Image: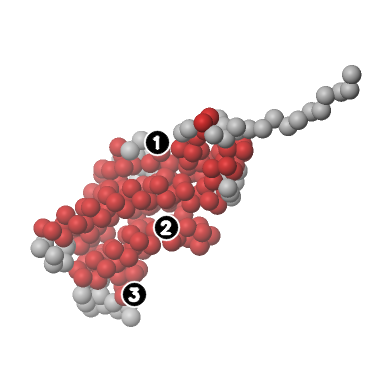
Amino acid sequence: MPPRKRTKKRVKLTATTNGTSDRLLDAAEAVFARNGYDAASIRMITKEARVQLALAHYHFKSKPELFRRVLIRRVDELRSRRLAMLENFKKRSNGGPVSITEIVQAFAEPAFYLSMHGGPGWKNYMKLNAQISIAAKYVSMVGDIYDPTAEVFLRELSRTLPNATVAATSWGYLFLVAATAAALSESGRIEMLSKQKLQSSQLEQAYTQAKIVMSAGLQALNGSDPIS
């Protein structure tokens, strides 16, 4: 009797993959946040998600595409919340410029809220977002994902600060982004600065202080502006 030919076992990628993409996104978010993009591998992510390696390639094709998809699902929801709050402030001002404090609140408060109440996925996203905000490599890879939000808030800053230059509002927005990202990274730096009197997890306190500093700094851009 001739020997039977061995055939490779094919992975089924149909009905058995229901919910797999969400599991992969959650796992990738955690692995990217914990290890950084470069150190993370697809194998590490599928192990965390407890799915077969082939399924990651089936759903997302590549590591860069998976990285973008991880960010897009969070950025879209965060943008929606930010713009909804900003629109409410604009309605209250009858279409006129809103206050700087309201712009800061519309940008920062939804992020702080989701970090405090959105579960571990949002915590992972905030840590990952902090890495992205300071690295040129990530900005070139995924910066376009954040541009629609930036365009809206830059436009509102220009309306509220008519005496500020484009340079001033652009830098001001960047500092708004950076300060929010730094506070939500919960890196442990505040513990060192305060000699353990404060905790990175005290996000309500962090938000209160951040709103004061960011509002005052942005408002100052409307005066005699040294930035051309």
Q: Tell me the CA gap for discs 1 and 2.
A: 22 Å
Q: Earlier in the sequence, mark 3 or mark 1?
A: 1
x then y, percent, for residue 184: 36, 47
Task: Look at 76% across and 30% down and name the residue there.
Answer: 7
Would you place residue 193 above or below residue 103 in this image? above
Would you place residue 35 above or below residue 1 in this image? below
x then y, percent, for residue 157: 25, 67
Q: Do the residues labelled 2 and 3 touch (CB within 8 Å)?
A: no
Which quadrant holds the C terminus?
bottom left
The residue lying toward the viewer, choosing from 121 and 199, is: 121
Q: Tell me the CA gap for discs 3 and 1.
A: 37 Å
Disc 1 target residue? 120
Mark in front: 1 vs 2: 2
Mark in front: 3 vs 1: 1
Q: Residues within 10 Å of mark 2 (few under 14, many from 20)?
A: some
Q: Earlier in the sequence, mark 1 or mark 2?
A: 1
96 relative to 127 in the view: left or right:
left
Disc 3 target residue? 167
Given the image, on which type of amino acid does mark 3 rest?
Ala
15 relative to 168 in the view: left or right:
right
Task: Look at 60% across and 32% down and name the residue there.
Answer: 12
Task: Look at 50% across and 62% down and name the residue there.
Answer: 140
Residue 6 visible in this rendered orientation of the protein: yes
